[in-house]
Amino acid sequence: MDSVQIDKNHYDFLKYENINRFASYYFQLKTVIELNPKNILEIGKGSGFFYREIKNQGIDIKVADFDESLNPDYVADVKNLPFEDNSFECICAFQILEHLPFDDFKISLKELKRVSLKYIFISLPDKGRYIKIDLRLPKIKTIKKLYDISNFKRDIHIFNGEHYWEINKIGYEEKKIQNLLTDNKWNIILNNRLFENPYHRFYLLEKNTNE
């Protein structure tokens, strides 16, 4: 990444935040708090919401960002992080890695795996088509289902000045992303497309300590 794509004013509350995004925040926080990591490195500060709430939980968190105007703890490129191997128990990168060309995404994954001691928790945009059912029958049953119909039709991705690629566009099928995330040391232990915000797909990777 050679230049900053997004001005910090992009993260102004009324412009950036919305109900769907708060569903993602809740899922991010709940998942990480349940992991109870000793320390966290967040890649990309964004609005700072996740960073602030994790600090409020008393968890040691640092943030690395390419954009120094966001005042991160470390100004750094995700492709070349200034940390020793296994420096952080958990590394988080939410809606960040799609801002890199796909070949750089693959390089960044290797760097995240190098720096992480145990977990990598990321989210990526998923443009796959879906059917959502949210049915509430008073005193009888509540049905909430998200059916993925990505195979029905995929769109071609066109760079919009921010996202170089998105899951389930042509050439970026979800299975292809899974294959890149896993290797002989790392397993996917969570793969979740949020019902409340299907555009965000979350992956939680855990290092195989038997290796």
Image (spheres, rainbow, N blue to C red):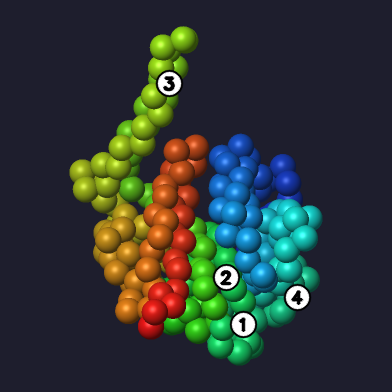
Crowd rating for badge 3 (residues with CA inside 10 Å; few <14, some 14–19, many 20+) = few
Q: Position of residue 22 (x, y in %)?
A: 62, 43
59 or 135: which is nearer to us? 59
Q: Position of residue 60 (x, y in %)?
A: 73, 68
Disc 4 versus disc 3: distance between alpha carbons? 44 Å
10 or 147: which is nearer to us? 147
Q: Which residue is mark 4?
A: 73
* Quarter occupied by the C terminus: bottom left
Q: Position of residue 153 (x, y in %)?
A: 23, 46
Crowd rating for badge 2 (residues with CA inside 10 Å; few <14, some 14–19, many 20+) = many
Whether the residues at callouts 1 and 4 have beta carbons within 8 Å, the answer is: no
Tell me the mark number nearer the camera, choosing from 1 and 4. 1
Q: Earlier in the sequence, mark 4 or mark 3?
A: 4
Whether the residues at callouts 3 and 2 have beta carbons within 8 Å, the answer is: no
Name the residue located 44 percent from the left edge and 17 percent from the top edge: 136
- The mark found on residue 142 in the picture is 3
Q: Which residue is mark 1?
A: 87
Q: Earlier in the sequence, mark 1 or mark 4?
A: 4
Q: Amino acid at mark 4?
A: Asp
Q: Amino acid at mark 1?
A: Ser
Label 4 sits on a secondary structure element that is loop
Q: Which residue is mark 2?
A: 91
Point out the residue furthest to the front here.
210
Disc 1 versus disc 3: distance between alpha carbons? 44 Å
Q: Amino acid at mark 3?
A: Thr
Label 1 sits on a secondary structure element that is loop
Q: Earlier in the sequence, mark 3 or mark 2?
A: 2
- Asked whether, in this view, residue 34 is left or right of residue 140, the answer is right
Q: Amino acid at mark 2?
A: Ile
Crowd rating for badge 1 (residues with CA inside 10 Å; few <14, some 14–19, many 20+) = some
Q: From this view, report whether residue 182 is shown above or below residue 57.
A: below
Disc 3 versus disc 2: distance between alpha carbons? 35 Å
